[in-house]
Amino acid sequence: MIRSQRGEQDPAQYWRRNLWVCMAGSFTTLVAMTLLLPFLPLYVAELGVSDPAAIARWSGLAYGATFFTAALTAPLWGRLADRYGRKLMLIRASLGMAVAMALIGMAGAPWQLVALRLLAGLLGGYASGSTILIASQTPKAHVGWALGMLSSGIMAGNVVGPLIGGLLPPLIGIRATFWLAGAVIFLAFLATCLLLKEAPRPTAQQRSPSSVRLNLRSGILPLMLLTGMLLIFANMSVEPIVTLYVAQFVHQAHRITLVAGIVMAAAALGSIISAAWLGRLADRIGHWPVLIGGLFAAALLLIPQAFITSAWQLVVLRFLMGIALGGLLPCIASLIRHHVANEQVGRALGWSTSAQYVGQVCGPLFGGIVGGWLGMRVVFLATGAIMGAGALYNFYRMRRTGGKA
């Protein structure tokens, strides 16, 4: 009995260590997924493709392949995490990504590159698995802060990946860059195996699937899936038009891409800075108020972005918008955790991850179509209106349910 009680206390005792391991593993795997963006066309050309149009097609296929299979398999890995253990899924994801990255560095044809990127998305999922483990095993009083810290690590990986991808290939070569990334992920695999501790899964008698059905009928889970998709949608809707929009205010051609890159990075930097702070605030005052406030703030900040007169104004506004949105995905994960039975958290968060990938696809499509049809300023206004509608509906549901979780 004493040993059992100690075993149950271990996960709570080590939740901070679990958080740092998951942050490091999520950071390295996201770096690996995004580092090839700057040199992907060069690698496709190195694999024997010479026609510029064909290089563009193969590059687009290769980059999108990982996210496509990751979106499809996220609910499956979440369900398996609930059934067989969340640590086991992190071990699988880190080892799978390490092997996939090493194999990508050995590709001999463009179709092999695409196939291996598909494999990376299929075998990966470390970041979403980390979210499941941290959401389910961190003490409730700290779950917002912990998920905010994890979110900062994930967003930092997305920012640092392309920077490393631009730095390393000229120094060590493209293939060696992939092998080095695989080696770093393998270190994350070892840390996951040796340092991570997971709470015992509940027995069949302790499970309560009826609570999941009740929450599905209440609409909380579908609302959180929609809101998560909306957040990524809002971040990504301006990506296709940023460079063209900035070009209207920057008159030196050689500075356009630099300023556009700063604009894109500003939102990510704001989110990295604010995620943990907003998570801690949500732990104190409730996750729903912070979520609604962030949605409203982002909606309001999108309006002046349509009427800027200088590029630096867009940088400042995107940075502030990143601050407003930084802690909102952790709030969504926390609300899902509070409204779904613990043994179903993995499945629910897996669906949440897939919904966010949908936003990652729909956002750029929306921005490109609306920008080309009605003008680039309309993209900001339309996105702001959609964000405002999402905030109002979340506020309505919070008032209706009387929830402050």
Image (cartoon, grey):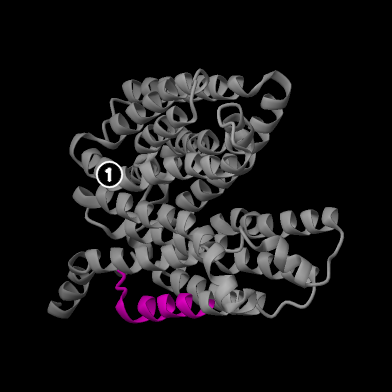
Left or right of 271 on screen, residue 279:
left
**Residue 196 in the image: x percent, y percent?**
32, 74
| Residue 303 visible | yes
Residue displayed at 37% across by 52% down: 151
Q: Quadrant of residue 338?
A: top left
Left or right of 114 on screen, residue 32:
left
What's the amino acid at mark 1?
Gly
The residue wearing badge 1 is 279
Secondary structure under the numbered disc 1 in the rendered image: helix
Residue 183 drawn in magenta: yes
Nearest the viewer among 12 and 317 is 317
Residue displayed at 72% across by 69% down: 113
**Residue 39 in the image: x percent, y percent?**
64, 63
Our reading of the magenta stretch's main secondary structure is: helix
| Quarter of the C terminus within the rendering | top left
Left or right of 381 on screen, residue 51:
right
Nearest the viewer among 97 and 50 is 50
Q: Is residue 331 above or below residue 136?
A: above
| Quarter of the N terminus within the rendering | bottom left
Q: Give the range drawn in magenta.
A: 182-198
**Residue 140 in the image: x percent, y percent?**
23, 50
Residue displayed at 77% across by 78% down: 108
